[in-house]
Amino acid sequence: MKTPFEQIQNDEGSSFRFLHQKVLAQQFPWNYHYHPEFELVLVFAGTGRRHVGNHLSYYDDGDLVLIGSNLPHAGFGYDALGEHEEIVVQFRDDFLGESFFDKPEMINIKKLFERSQQGIQFYGQTYQEVAEALKKLIGLSQFERLMGLLDIFQILAGSQEYNLLNSIDTRYDFNQKDQMRLKRVYEYVEKTYQHPINIREVADIANLTVPSFCNYFKKVVNQTFTDFMNEYRINKACQLLMTEKSIADVCFECGFTNNSYFSKVFKEIKGKSPLEFKKLVLRKS
């Protein structure tokens, strides 16, 4: 059984689907799926996990991602903290007619859609501008939303503030067995990340030998299990650093055994020290 197919239903009176939702992050399952519709996802704020194709990473202060047709992905609310608010726009490449995006005026948008087959994450001023534009669509009519969406496509098409999440030749061949195996591994990590992880136990959960598990995980997730664990723990640390807890307490609560290694890994992943991150959060609050 292959990766689950999700059926998308357009909004009534519209050629695409526009969804604005606020839910508790705990309600998000790990739901890796695909559909022929392109998907534009705006996460308003907060931290969480993005899993697009074989790319798995964390966002820190909201997210903006364009996902190409049939590119497998999971919900962006998974592993987030507290209330998760997002806007999701789903549309087919021919939602305005088979040849609409072949028009000369649409050439840059067509190239944008082609790049989106790798998954595109936008940041900086582009994130800010598109976030505001998407929020304005909430109260508009279907026609006004369509016009606004084309403007958003044009902004994204002209932006240089983006990261491609997968290489162009990446294959996405997760089957049901892969999904269930990874789900068991993720659940184990969620329950035990505060303690030393026994790689043999993780391999047993995946029904693999230790060498086979390490090779398997690197192949399907596109990063080593050690790197995945470090990213997971640092993401948890970011959540705790937003509280009154000390850096030392956060270090040990997230499964690190000494402050110097914690600070080193934190800076490698986040580009700043835990203290710099905490000061930044305090200034924003």
Image (cartoon, rainbow, N blue to C red):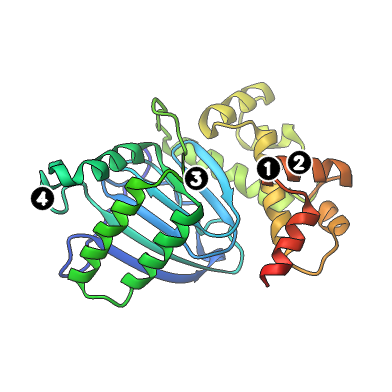
Q: How crowded is mark 3: few (under 14 residues within 10 Å), some or many (20 or more)?
A: many
Q: Name the residue under label 4.
A: 97
Looking at marks 2 and 4 on the same chain, the residue that comes earlier in the sequence is marked by 4
What residue sits 74% from the left and 44% below the top? Answer: 267
Q: Mark 3 points at which residue?
A: 51
Looking at marks 2 and 3 on the same chain, the residue that comes earlier in the sequence is marked by 3
Q: Name the residue under label 2.
A: 265
Is 191 above or below relative to 197?
below
The amino acid on which the numbered mark 3 sits, given as a three-letter code, is: His
| Observer-nearest of 117 and 204 | 117
Kind of element beneath mark 4: loop
Q: In which quarter of the image is residue 56?
A: top right
Task: Give how far across and how far down residue 191 sits, in percent.
Answer: 70, 52
The amino acid on which the numbered mark 4 sits, given as a three-letter code, is: Gly
Is 269 above or below relative to 86?
above
The dot on residue 73 is none
Task: Give how far across and how far down residue 193 sits, in percent.
Answer: 74, 48
**Whether residue 240 can be seen here:** no
Task: Give how far across and how far down residue 124 sits, in percent.
Answer: 51, 53
The amino acid on which the numbered mark 2 sits, given as a three-letter code, is: Val
Looking at marks 3 and 1 on the same chain, the residue that comes earlier in the sequence is marked by 3
What residue sits 53% from the left and 27% below the top? Answer: 219
What residue sits 60% from the left and 69% below the top? Answer: 82
Label 1 close to label 2 by CB (< 8 Å): yes
Q: How crowded is mark 2: few (under 14 residues within 10 Å), some or many (20 or more)?
A: many
Label 4 close to label 1 by CB (< 8 Å): no
Q: Name the residue under label 1.
A: 269
Looking at marks 4 and 1 on the same chain, the residue that comes earlier in the sequence is marked by 4
